[in-house]
Image (cartoon, helix red, strand yellow):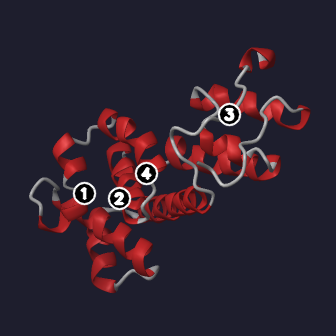
């Protein structure tokens, strides 16, 4: 259960943004219901994560591989719950999802995926990426893709840390969700 109650999305100061979030995400997910305690933070978060998920050139399967690995490394089950269906839809196999905990000894990841996973692990666990890990990523990606990869790893570390600090859980009760008033 979350450490503080979820924000009321029917408040005057949150209604328009809640409607925008629902339009983009299909609903006002738990994460955004918590973020809506601070509308400026929620709005910035929405813009940043929309750019990461929908405006970058990094392939969706690699993006979701990063997200699922970050969720695993940071012990963020809500993040994994939200993204596992997306990961499958983007082309990750069940075997890949199952073998994420032991990816380095698995044969279900190709060389590019392995470079991404090593980069994700380094950024998440140690912050600084060792030169051999970066060189491996550099062999597979151009500058734009490297920036987008690093931004994706960073963004989802931010997400998982926020989720876990406030103990946001998939099955928490969140309160009223009457979005008809916004449309």
Name the spot of residue 46 as percent of width and height, x first: 66, 45
* Mark 2 in CB contact with mark 1 (< 8 angstroms): yes
Name the spot of residue 78 as percent of width and height, x first: 48, 47
Question: Mark 3 sits on what residue?
Answer: 21
Q: Is residue 3 left or right of residue 159?
A: right
Q: Secondary structure at mark 2?
A: helix
Distance from disc 2 to disc 1, alpha carbons, whole Å, reads 7 Å
Distance from disc 1 to disc 4, alpha carbons, whole Å, reads 14 Å
Height in image: 18 above or below 55? above
| Identity of the residue furthest to the left in this view | 107
Disc number for residue 69 = 2
Q: Of label 2 and label 1, which has the lower sequence position?
A: 2
| Identity of the residue furthest to the front in this view | 1
Judging depth in this view, the residue of 75 and 1 nearest the camera is 1
Q: Secondary structure at mark 3?
A: helix
Question: Mark 4 sits on what residue?
Answer: 77
Q: Of label 2 and label 3, which has the lower sequence position?
A: 3
Q: Is residue 56 left or right of residue 47?
A: left
Name the spot of residue 69 as percent of width and height, x first: 35, 58
The label nearer to you, 4 versus 3, is: 4
Q: Of label 1 and label 3, which has the lower sequence position?
A: 3
The label nearer to you, 1 versus 3, is: 1
Q: Residue at horizontal 83%, vertical 36%?
A: 14
**Image quadrant in which you'd find residue 70:** bottom left
Question: Mark 1 sits on what residue?
Answer: 100
């Amino acid at each position: 259960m979350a450490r503080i109650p979820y924000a009321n999305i029917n408040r005057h100061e949150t209604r328009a943004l809640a409607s925008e979030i629902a339009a983009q995400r299909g609903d006002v997910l738990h994460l955004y219901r918590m973020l809506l305690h601070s509308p400026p933070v929620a709005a910035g978060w929405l813009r940043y994560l929309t750019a990461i998920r929908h405006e970058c050139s990094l392939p969706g399967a690699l993006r979701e591989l990063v997200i699922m690995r970050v969720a695993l490394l940071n012990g963020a089950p809500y993040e994994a719950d939200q993204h596992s269906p997306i990961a499958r839809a983007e082309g990750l196999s069940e075997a890949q999802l199952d073998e994420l905990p032991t990816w380095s000894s698995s044969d279900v990841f190709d060389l590019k995926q392995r470079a991404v996973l090593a980069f994700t692990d380094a950024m998440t666990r140690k912050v600084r990426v060792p030169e051999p890990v970066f060189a491996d990523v550099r062999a597979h990606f151009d500058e734009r893709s490297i920036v987008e990869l690093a931004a994706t790893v960073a963004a989802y570390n931010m997400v998982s840390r926020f989720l876990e600090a406030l103990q946001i859980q998939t099955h928490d009760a969140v309160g009223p969700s009457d979005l008809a008033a916004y449309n």
